[in-house]
Amino acid sequence: MRDVAVVATAQHQVAALTGTTEVQLMVPLLNAVRDAIGLTQADIGFTCSGSSDFLAGQAFSFVHTLDAVGSVPPICESHVEMDGAFALYEAWVKIQTGAADTALVYGYGKSSPGSLRDVLALQLDPYYVAPLWPTADAVAALQARLLLESGVSGAGELAEIAVRSMRHAVGSPHAVRSSADVTVADVLAEAPVADPLRPSDIAAEADGGCAVVLAAGDLARGLCERPAWIRGIDHRIDAHGLGVRDLTRSPSAAAAAVGAGAGDDRLDFAELHGLYTSQEAILVRELDLDDDLLVNPSGGALAGNTTMAAGLMRIAEAAARISAGEGDRALAHATSGPCLQQNLVCVLEGE
Amino acid sequence: MSGERIAVLGVGQTKYRSTRGDVSIAGLVREAAYRALEDAQLGWGDIDAVVIGKAPDFFEGVMMPELYLADALGCVGKPMLRVHTAGSVGGSTALVAASLVQARIHRRVLTLGFEKQSESNATWALSLPQPFSVSANAGAGGYFSPIIRQYMARSGAPDLIGCMVAFKDRQNALLNPYAHLHQHDLTFEKVVESPMLWDPIRYSETCPSSDGACAMVLGDEVAGDAATGPVAWVHGTAMRSEANNFPGRDEVNPLASRDCAADVFRQAGITDPRTQVDVVEVYVPFSWYEPMWLESLGFAEPDNGWRMVEDGSTSLDGGDLPVNASGGVLSSNPIGASGMIRFAEAAMQVRGMAGEHQVDGARTALGHAYGGGAQYFAMWVVGSEKP
């Protein structure tokens, strides 16, 4: 395997982007990552992005975003209808083939024009579940309810996760929900949205985008003072049917962590893409994270969840922190689908 | 090509039809996947990862349907990727799968493209109103017809070249049991007399709207050597994209197409495509794109691709470079699978397994796909021998 590192990151996330298209959102971010390391698009070996037509409300929506990249002369480029973290995986694979030494990766989402909770119902089995139009929160509440009733977790633990996210998010430039003085009692006093999930248990919806540059070997060392090396990256998917799997578990998350070698050495922190406090509680167990590990120093996806980019943002947050010398080894996680169906784990290290 | 050698171990296709009402989306993809596994003489447990592609999710009205399809594709506990690069997606999907083998991350990968257009309405899906933009609601034919007219003007091609392409492909389709259109009573005169939809594109010069899926099993060199039947070896892979609109863009012969062809032929050691390639599966949704792509790919001199159509060079019956022996996109178009069908048919030809539409002695083949406003390109060259 070639050594590949994250050498530049940029992101922008707000509660709702108004008056800005996805192209306008991405132009400054793509310029920022390339400028940070002095590369132009002509220097990039491969470009890969992640987004969803269902958020954009338009077929082939990613075609327009190509204008933000700059593709004259033509570029070697691909797109996944997945979170940008999976675009990063495809780019990492491309570098592993030897066909490219650098890659530009981006993901973006603007869910605010629609009702995300309803749109996500269309991700479910189209014949038996989607016609019922369960909201994303209602589906997640089934998982949370099972978690509480099985005794794996308690309402107090979930509230503590919510409080920790909001406290960490204070001063985090991309967080859209933060609070320095919220307490567990405050969270527990909230009326449930989808019982047992309270507003603070649910990731704060956001619009935004994220861009990352990958580079191999000495090239990465030359571009960046302290590259964040991808020591392992793996992803797996579980069964889709909500009734055919134990919703209190996420075997795909556990397998991805093992595949990425997360447990091979001590971690300094983790950035998790849990969309609900209940999902974060499951992830901490499945990823086998130590009780005292620093989880989501940025506030995590709970503090701001841009659908289709939140996973890539976790990798970008972890990489930026490592490059800044605020840790030597980190786990970044991305998820997709209902109830943690699909999971990606990326282990990053400084040198 | 750098990295691990890649072999096509198996190919599976569904019957293409307007409506495959006999199967669900899961049933459709499973049909193709199962046939690919059977062809490769492998089971679900032999597959390390799945790479799936399809065109816009609005075509079925299911957001990221691969999540729901994980179970049907034997993917539980494995890695799964979903590619979407417009009309070229079937080709790009195969290339992403190939890169997983090439990078030595996986030994055997199942890749699949599908579209079940009957689940939704493509015209609706392509016409969702956007703020601050006016849609011509002209469909793909309306988009491409001015580009075709530009080609006709600058090449001086006779008016009926497109009809010749369409008639050839529909005749070829009669030899392909999976093809959507089997028009036994079609004549060249009927093609010419069919209604003009978007001048110069007639009804019989356009692709149908199909349900269907195509799958391939790709493996590494060890897997290729271990196969009991013939395999196709990948000699080159390339993808290119360019913006839809910029000053000086050649829409008839896009630079991204030329760059992509140059890259894939360089990898395959092909310096004279016309003599070194035996059979071509090119993405031709509108008849005139056959001569246009033949020029862009270097099989003909600029403005002369139509002569290959006129003199029968691209015919399965005696031509020196049969194009779309399968009947092509003009005879079957499950959009998200259409590119992969081109790639898979190229592999079938060099494996000698194309049945009645086999080109005798085919050793080197090109699979080609394009998408967007002729701005996304994916290509591979496959051969009967190891690279």
Image (cartoon, coloured by chain):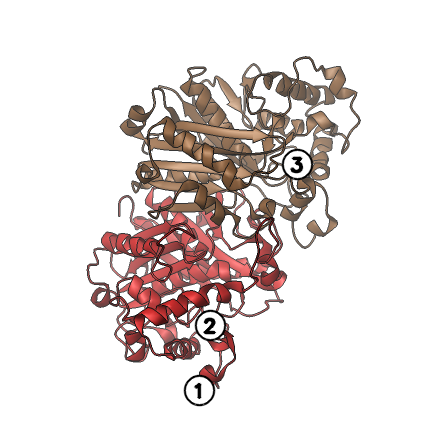
Q: Secondary structure at mark 1?
A: helix
Q: Secondary structure at mark 2?
A: loop
Residue B204 x %, y %: 48, 77
Residue B33 x %, y %: 49, 57
Residue A247 bears which disc, if any? Answer: 3
Chain identifier, colour red: B
Marked residue nearer the N-terminal end (1 or 2): 1
Query: Which residue corresponds to the image point at 43% horizontal and 23% vertical from the top-left?
Result: A264
Tell me what hue chain A is rendered in: brown
Residue B189 bears which disc, if any? Answer: 1
Position of B187 relative to A216 (above/below): below
* Residue B331 shows in the view: yes
Amino acid type shown at disc 1: Glu
Residue B52 x %, y %: 48, 51
Q: Crowding at label 1, few (<14), some or many (≥20) Cα neighbours within 10 Å?
A: few
The one nearer the camera, A111 or B94, is: A111
Residue contact at pointers 1 and 2, CB within 8 angstroms: no
Residue corresponding to mark 2: B331
| Image quarter of the C terminus of chain A | top left
Residue A17 bears which disc, if any? Answer: none
Chain of the residue on which disc 3 is drawn: A
